[in-house]
Image (cartoon, rainbow, N blue to C red):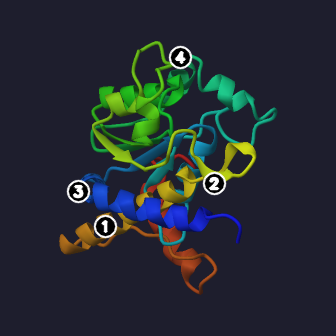
Amino acid sequence: MRTDYIPQVLRLLQETYARQQETLQTAATWIADALASDGVLYVFGASHAGIITEELTYRAGGLVPVSPIFIPGLTCDVRPLPLTSALERIDGYALAAVKHIPISPSDVVLVHSVSGRNAAPVEVALHAKQQGAKVIALTALDYSQSVSPRSSTGYRLFEVADLVIDNGAPRGDAVVHLAGFPQPVAPVSTVLGAALVNAIVAEACAILLERGITPPVFMSANLDGGDAHNAKLMERYRGRVLYL
């Protein structure tokens, strides 16, 4: 291949894992504590950051009590798609939606934003903290520190979260540089973020098992017995996981 995208992803993932092991362990412990107390994991991201929300939601091998925060206009199925960029910058827009979600002190809220500078992720994080939930930020720390806040609060996501996971993505996200072409191509935040959050989920399940608690994990619906297994678990969380 002419480009080095996969080697760069592998390098960044290894470097990020080496730096973030303690932080990932803390995140997993918080999530295990929440599930042991019958809480849920809420997840939010605007626009492409919301792909991590989808990755964790209703996922074979993933946790059942993951409640996605999908705010109208901030997901990639809207048209025109540039609307997501406009709406996530508007002060009060995300707050108007998230304040109706029953976040409690028993819950953990994971907010994903690569730059962390826009109003939407900051408002979700601040509101969750006001409800007493633990807030985990998944962000690109060097990138976020290099840009100014767009939220009227004056904060970026990493400045308001209880725990910050640095995904290691560079400023601007893309990592492949082509000769004679000034714009880097091929972003890495999604693949890095997906690996990190799934590592956290796996560790949270291991912690629960050590405590004698069976982790509430989805079975593939395409395996025999999967539908029955999943239906039983989903019934337990009906009314608290937003899509059930």
Q: Residues within 10 Å of mark 2 (few under 14, many from 20)?
A: some
**Badge 1 is on which residue?**
203
**Badge 3 is on which residue?**
22
Determine the residue positioned at 37% across, 26% down: 126
**Badge 2 is on which residue?**
176
Toward the right, the furthest residue is 80
User: Could you give the CA–CA distance between mark 3 and mark 2, rounded to whole angstroms?
Assistant: 29 Å
- Going by the numbered disc 4, the residue's amino acid type is Gly
Residues under numbered marks 4 and 2 in contact, where contact means CB atoms less than 8 Å apart = no
- Going by the numbered disc 3, the residue's amino acid type is Glu
User: Could you give the CA–CA distance between mark 3 and mark 1, rounded to whole angstroms?
Assistant: 12 Å
- Going by the numbered disc 2, the residue's amino acid type is Val
Determine the residue positioned at 75% across, 31% down: 82
Is 139 left or right of 94, judged from the image as shown? Answer: left
Determine the residue positioned at 39% across, 67% down: 216
Of circles 4 and 2, which is in front?
2
Q: Earlier in the sequence, mark 1 or mark 2?
A: 2
Please say if 30 is above or below 129. below
- Going by the numbered disc 1, the residue's amino acid type is Glu
**Badge 4 is on which residue?**
92
Q: Residues within 10 Å of mark 4 (few under 14, many from 20)?
A: some
Please say if 41 is above or below 199. above
